[in-house]
Image (cartoon, rainbow, N blue to C red):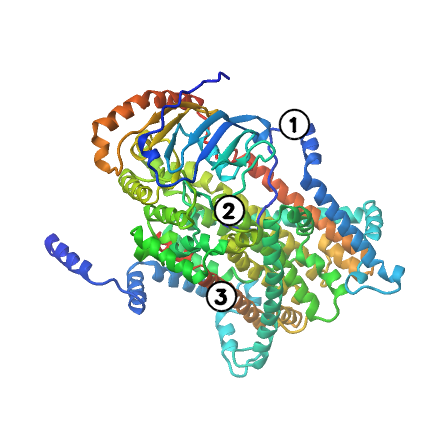
Amino acid sequence: MTQQMVKMPDMPAQVHTARTTRGEISIRNVTKIYDPEGVNVMAIDNCSMEVAPGEFCMIVGPSGCGKTTLLNAIAGFHSITSGEILLDRKLLCGPGKLIAAQGADRIVVFQNGALFPWKTLAQNVAYGPMVQGVLSKRNALAKAHEMLAEAGLGEFGGKYPGEVSSGMARRAEIVRALINNPKVLLLDEPYRAMDGLTKSIMHEALLEVYDRTKVTIFFVTHDLEEAIFLGDRVYVMTTRPCRLKKVVNVDIPRPRNYEVLSSEQFRLLVEETRDAVHEEAIKAFRLGERELA
Amino acid sequence: MNNHAIATAARANSKRAAPAGLSLIWYRLRKKLRTSTPYLMVLGLALWMVTWWLFSEVWKLPRFDKMPGPVVLLKDWLAREPFHGISFFTELYYEHIWASTRRILIAFAIATTLGVPLGLFMGWSKRFKDYTFPILETLRPIPILAWVPLAILMFSGYETPVIFLATLASLYVTTLNTLLGVESIDESYFRAAGCLGSKPWHVFVHVVVPGALPFIFTGLQISVGVAWFSLVAAEMVSGDYGLGYLIMQSYVNSVTVPLVIAMVTLGFVGWFTSALVRRVGNLMMQWRVRALALEGR
Amino acid sequence: MVSVGEISRPMAVARSRRSFLLKTLGRQEFWRGLVAIIVFLVLWEIGSRSKEWFGYALPYVGLLPPPSDVAVAWSDVLMKWGYWESWYKSFGRVLTGFIAAQIIGIPFGLMLAINKYFRDVFFPPFEVLRPIPPLAWVPASLIFWPTNEMSIAFVTFLGAFFTIVINVLGGARTIDVRYLRAAQSMGASQWDLFWRIILPGTLPSIFTGAAVGMGITWEVVVAAEMISSGGTQGGGGLGFFIWNSYMGGSLPQIVVGMISIGIAGYLSSSIIRMIGDRAMPWRKLF
């Protein structure tokens, strides 16, 4: 297990002018070993990174490498074996407290969508404030309809997730997260199952949301171009066990739109990062193992 | 018509509003009538009836002559003064039907009120499940009817043992299916609820209960069927009034017509109660009905 | 198809026997279950002896035979040939009815699934007859068939038949149409499609139907034995054993009979599950 020191480049310019001061994540020497059927599996190996408040941070790696495990550790779905994770300088999990408490300050948007199928979109969005006692049921629903309309989903508030397209469902899920004003938005390959056209619309919608709210985003994906198009900083992870391989600053100015995809700067960034990702992808393919949960 | 005319007509048609409500039902009916399905159905049923009639009344084949044919059956069933005492016009018929139905209702109500919370709780708390599941699984293989003597010992009268047996049968099914329902809920929903700041109570009400509903209702449908199964058996062994009892009595008294009438009635009432439960389920699970409709089911 | 459910999941077959035992003993669920059953037995014992010990019989429980008496009665009865003969007779009936139901039911179900015209003609009468509880057929069956045995066999057959057909029908119809198309694009004939895609694809449903059908078969056999024993020959079997014990007033023996049937039923279902696991190695073991 060679300790590969990755030189962290300087913070990109945009982050310094961010309007938020919350949502700073520090991941320090985190290791996660777990034990399916008695065979130790090291999912994360001594991983460290610092995410600034308001940063749009992308984690890229081949499928099954353990990046989702990292996200789950932040969200409090798993424990970690060693190391520590801090949110805004306060300990989320670490020695003595191996699993973070789940809470509305770090909300996850799931890969296959986790809108409650038995609630309408509006009821889903209203769920958070209602359940935390922040708003009464009626007010929560009103605010939900408002925010859905802002996101362009106004007419669909009364529909069930099973009745709308996956793109709309995913956008509604993001609204459901944002209505709680979280410190961090954790996105776990949310657009993985979508076709290219829907994906590009999702990207623009997400960029618009980010420009408006400047919430810290921790986005896990396997798609390098998506990462560079959306993020401020891209962390390239190795295949299992997950270690930091390379960090790239994305200096493309905001607000961004799809024209960025054909720009020279974009192309150069992709080239810079592609070899690293490709190398890991080949290793992962050779391993041939099923993706981790 | 040539292709051009067909295309023009189709284009004009597609601009009309889609049929809804009553006209939708009529449209579907007309569409169905154009296929061979309903005619074959009628054929199948007719074939069966005619074979039965031929075997028992016309040709009087060796074993079949002991059974009443459809004509004899219908004659009595629809008669004002039935030869064997049971028909659509006699009060006794309805007394028997009501006796059985009443018992089913009570058994089903008790089994559901006990079974659903039990199953939900077993799915919710692993500790609770660890303690209760083994007892359930040990008792379950014992056939319901094997309980008859014990039931008669424990409970006095005719009604209670019979209702007990039907309740027991329903209880197993309801509890198990509810448990399965809770365990089938995708982990992501629990996680989503967790990171939205829910307390355990919220998760129970907003995730566990609605998430398990589909399985719960499948279980309830099965449990109605199982309740009927056990009820009839129990009535046949020890009871007074009720369709099972009627069957047994007719057998003992060697009158086959009421026997078959009772059987057919049982079939119908059983189907009806099951369909009722399914309807209620659909009402409560609008989200599922609508999503399935979009898939064309 | 949803069945009442074989909840118990098969252990990973790869483990050696010794570590299997150790693993079970190490599991929390095992100990909690054991505690629960022991508590259950203790409560039963106390409740059923309430008249003796407290002078006051608890309602319901107080009228039951205590587990200690049951244990004694069981050790007695194990020595008697009559007891084992009942096992043999009941198993015989169960197997006859069950196998007949599979032999007729599986092809019938497959035919219904494959051929639309066949289904349109034969499904309606099937659906009309299905809601009638099998036991309601007993008297009619007794009248119709010449011997007791045949009438019991017929009713047993009915019980399992309806279940297996419904399960096969459901299973065959839910085979992903993509598998069929993939096979066709590789040049499969109708015959190939049936034997290589539809049949293996329906196997899980067949086994589910068989397991549930087995449970129903036992119910029906026991019931039929109890009902028809009131009549003529009293043809033996575990159901008759229970009824006889009841009539003869030996209460602990009733419970012995009940538990015996429970064990027999559980064994039958386990055998089916084991055969199922062998026949379908591609299914992931939970």
Mark 2 lies on residue: B194
Q: Could you tell me which secondary element the residue under label 1 belongs to? A: loop
Residue visible at 71% across and 70% down?
Answer: B158
Residue A44 on image: x %, y %: 49, 27
Same subunit: marks 1 and 3: no
Residue C79 on image: x %, y %: 83, 45
Looking at the image, residue C112 sits to the left or right of residue B140; the answer is left
Residue density around tag 2, few if under 14, some if 14–19, many if 20 or more, within 10 Å: many
Q: Is residue B114 visible?
A: yes
Q: CA distance from mark 2 to mark 1?
A: 39 Å
- Give the label on residue A37, or none: none
Mark 1 lies on residue: C16
Query: Mark 2 belongs to which amino acid?
Result: Gly
Query: Mark 3 belongs to which amino acid?
Result: Leu
Residue A273 on image: x %, y %: 32, 23
Q: Are marks 3 and 2 in contact (CB under 8 Å)?
A: no
Mark 3 lies on residue: B276
